[in-house]
Image (tube, rainbow, N blue to C red):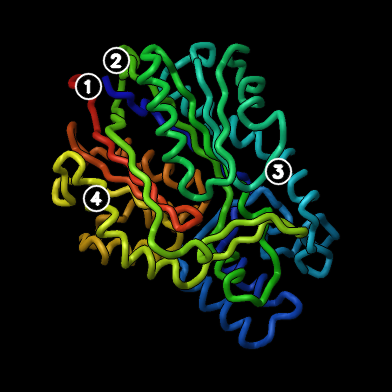
């Protein structure tokens, strides 16, 4: 009996950033020479992002708040806040975002908080203990006996290991109802730097959270659901130093080199073929693709590497356009769109791909199910 994603809920902070305003904000930071300014304009304009969301209200309206703040000073310059300051802000603001996504998922699934048996959380943009898993129990009124698991620092690919853990729990305990929540505050770690890799990171990351209710109980499948068929993981032959996420004195530092899209483009066909071939599936049988939008160039390379039609990654491009890269939460935003997509029929298969530090490729295979034939 397969576990199913019964619903997906999402949440983003109130502050919306227009990409052109953030571009101009970074271009006028001190220490940016003409070359750095040209790189800022090139990276932001080529990002295929219109808006992002942030917990840092000081970044609104191009950082023109006009008063000294924690992250932006009165002159509109980014403050090199310490890691402790950034993490304290994560501790203060992340739980509400986790809870908002979880409440939406539970409401859409028609599942009471008191019925949840397990919580699996994932995040890589902050740490505190007792952590997000504990706070969900308190904030949502889950049973105090709820089993909790937290996956930390797995980067953008963490949602699939979290769903895999939920699937394993449901296989071992078929009556389980697992709440999976991924939440990231990526903008806490943006910095003013003329370094090309930091400019690229500043151009793509946003904040958001997403939650999925997972269970193998047939009686809970009242609406469309996604059956969890199987998962795969692979480490590429190179890329260990090309996608890196480390803790520094002034926040977490993302290394995202230009080699990442090229490595993905070279290796994605073999990784996907190996994953799908497990049960004789091939790309031709896949109705939809849920691909983590690490950036526009990543999506372009996946599309070309798998010979996909132009429209195949539209859901991923739409989420990138509206929210940017929200790390681990992003793929759940994409799966939510597919869960609600009326053009996907009962039995249609969805292949998921996400990329994490290493370079690691996480894969997942889902089947769309309708309530009358689940």
Query: Residue 360 has which mark?
Result: none
Query: Residue 274 has which mark?
Result: 4
Contact flag, marks 2 and 1 (Cβ < 8 Å): yes
Mark 2 = which residue?
218
Query: Residue 90 has which mark?
Result: 3
363 relative to 93 in the view: left or right? left
How far apart are labels 3 and 2 at the CA level?
Answer: 37 Å
365 relative to 192 in the view: left or right? left
How far apart are labels 4 and 1 at the CA level?
Answer: 28 Å
Mark 1 falls on what kind of element?
loop
Location of residue 157 with respect to 294 vertically, above or below: above
168 relative to 122 in the view: left or right? left
Location of residue 323 with respect to 165 vertically, above or below: below
Front disc: 4 or 1: 4
How far apart are labels 2 and 1 at the CA level?
Answer: 8 Å
Mark 1 = which residue?
374
Residue visible at 31% across and 62% down in the picture: 267
Q: Earlier in the sequence, mark 4 or mark 1?
A: 4
278 relative to 179 in the view: left or right? left
The residue closer to the viewer here, 107 or 210, is 210
Screen quadrant of the C terminus: top left
Q: Earlier in the sequence, mark 2 or mark 1?
A: 2
Q: Earlier in the sequence, mark 3 or mark 4?
A: 3
Location of residue 232 with respect to 9 vertically, above or below: below
How far apart are labels 2 and 4 at the CA level?
Answer: 31 Å
Contact flag, marks 3 and 4 (Cβ < 8 Å): no
Q: Position of residue 305 (x, y in %)?
A: 26, 64
How far apart are labels 1 and 3 at the CA level?
Answer: 40 Å
Mark 3 falls on what kind of element?
helix
């Amino acid at each position: 009996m397969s576990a199913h994603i019964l619903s997906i809920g999402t949440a983003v902070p109130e502050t919306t950033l227009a990409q052109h305003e953030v571009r101009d904000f970074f271009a006028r930071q001190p220490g940016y020479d003409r070359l750095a300014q040209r790189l800022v304009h090139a990276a932001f304009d080529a990002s295929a992002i219109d808006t992002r969301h942030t917990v840092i209200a000081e970044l609104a309206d191009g950082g023109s708040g006009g008063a000294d703040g924690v992250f932006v000073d009165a002159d509109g310059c980014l403050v090199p806040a310490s890691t402790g300051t950034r993490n304290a802000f994560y501790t203060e603001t992340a739980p509400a975002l986790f809870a908002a996504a979880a409440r939406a998922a539970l409401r859409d699934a028609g599942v009471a908080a008191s019925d949840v048996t397990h919580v699996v959380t994932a995040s890589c943009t902050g740490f505190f203990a007792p952590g997000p898993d504990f706070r969900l129990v308190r904030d949502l009124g889950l049973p105090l006996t709820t089993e909790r698991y937290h996956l930390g620092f797995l980067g953008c690919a963490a949602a699939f290991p979290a769903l895999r853990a939920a699937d394993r729990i449901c296989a071992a305990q078929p009556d389980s109802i697992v709440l999976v929540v991924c939440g990231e505050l990526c903008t806490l770690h943006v910095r003013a730097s003329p370094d090309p890799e930091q400019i690229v990171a500043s151009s793509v990351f946003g904040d958001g959270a997403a939650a999925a209710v997972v269970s193998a109980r047939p009686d809970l499948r009242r609406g469309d659901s996604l059956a969890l068929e199987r998962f795969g993981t692979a480490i590429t032959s190179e890329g260990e130093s090309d996608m890196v996420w480390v803790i520094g004195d002034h926040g977490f530092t993302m290394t995202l080199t230009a080699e990442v899209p090229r490595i993905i483009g070279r290796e994605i066909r073999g990784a996907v073929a190996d994953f799908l071939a497990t049960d004789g599936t091939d790309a031709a049988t896949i109705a939809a693709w849920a691909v983590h939008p690490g950036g526009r160039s990543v999506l372009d390379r996946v599309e070309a590497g798998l010979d996909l039609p132009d429209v195949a990654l539209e859901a991923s491009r739409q989420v990138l356009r509206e929210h940017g890269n929200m790390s681990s939460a992003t793929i759940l935003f994409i799966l939510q769109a597919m869960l609600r997509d009326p053009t996907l029929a009962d039995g249609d298969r969805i292949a998921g791909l996400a990329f994490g530090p290493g370079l690691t490729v996480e894969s997942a295979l889902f089947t769309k199910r309708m309530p009358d034939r689940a």
